[in-house]
Amino acid sequence: MDAIECIKGRRSIRSFTDEPVSHELLEEVIDVARFAPSWKNTQIARYIAVEGAKKEEVAANCFKAWVGNEEMVRKAPMVICLTYVKNRSGFERDGSFSTSKEDRWQNFDAGIAAQTFCLAAHEKGLGTVILGIFDEHEAERVLEIPEDRGVAAFIVIGHHEGNPEAPKRKEVSDLVSYFS
Ligand SMILES: Cc1cc2nc3c(=O)[nH]c(=O)nc-3n(C[C@H](O)[C@H](O)[C@H](O)COP(=O)(O)O)c2cc1C
């Protein structure tokens, strides 16, 4: 699979087989994802793999805003809580913000890490879907996230059969503009 096939062929996968995701395979995915770019190479992304009874607790408490996500997490073999180390990306050494975007580079870096993770998983035959609708404070409580970490997103991951159709994309002409 070349890079273009990987980018265009990755889909958000919302149903999975019962096959567990081995820790070895997950670590192969993270071995690729760690090459994602980051602010001054701060590499703030951290992956918490949640399975078994803790996954049930996450499903029951963190997705009350949308039952679709709750059911997905319940049925999938694993969900990743993508966290980041706070106060590094976008910050100077003295703790001040580097730019007017203040602390928003943290989530930018986490987003790049999330997509890199999902592409690596796709190349290794795993399906993923990023979940943005979740209760951040419940996630912090249930997963005992320390003060110096933020929760960026959840990523459901598992083995799957078939690929859904790609949702319609905008045309290049809708996306690009030139200014000279
Ligand atoms: C930041 C972000 C948050 C998302 N949140 C959810 C979510 O809460 N639940 C869900 O089912 N899909 C979620 N998605 C998946 C999108 O719906 C999906 O990427 C989009 O429809 C395009 O489909 P594709 O990923 O198959 O190309 C999210 C995607 C992103 C990037």
Image (cartoon, rainbow, N blue to C red):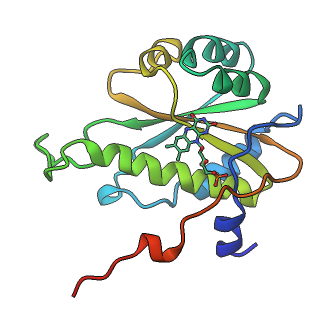
Point out the image quarter for the N terminus: bottom right
Up the image or down, 108 lies above or below 142; here it is below
Left or right of 61 in this view: 175: left
Q: Quadrant of ligand 1?
A: top right
Q: Nearer the viewer, residue 100 or 164?
A: 164
Left or right of 107 in this view: 95: left
Q: Nearer the viewer, residue 48 or 178?
A: 178
Q: Residue 7's quadrant in the figure?
A: bottom right
Point out the image quarter for the C terminus: bottom left
Q: Position of residue 29 (x, y in %)?
A: 66, 51
| Residue lying at 40% horizontally and 75% vertically, measured from the top left | 176
Q: Position of residue 91 (x, y in %)?
A: 19, 46
Q: Position of residue 156 (x, y in %)?
A: 67, 36
| Residue lying at 69% horizontally and 58% vertically, measured from the top left | 10
| Residue lying at 71% horizontally and 58% vertically, measured from the top left | 166
| Residue lying at 88% horizontally and 36% vertically, measured from the top left | 17
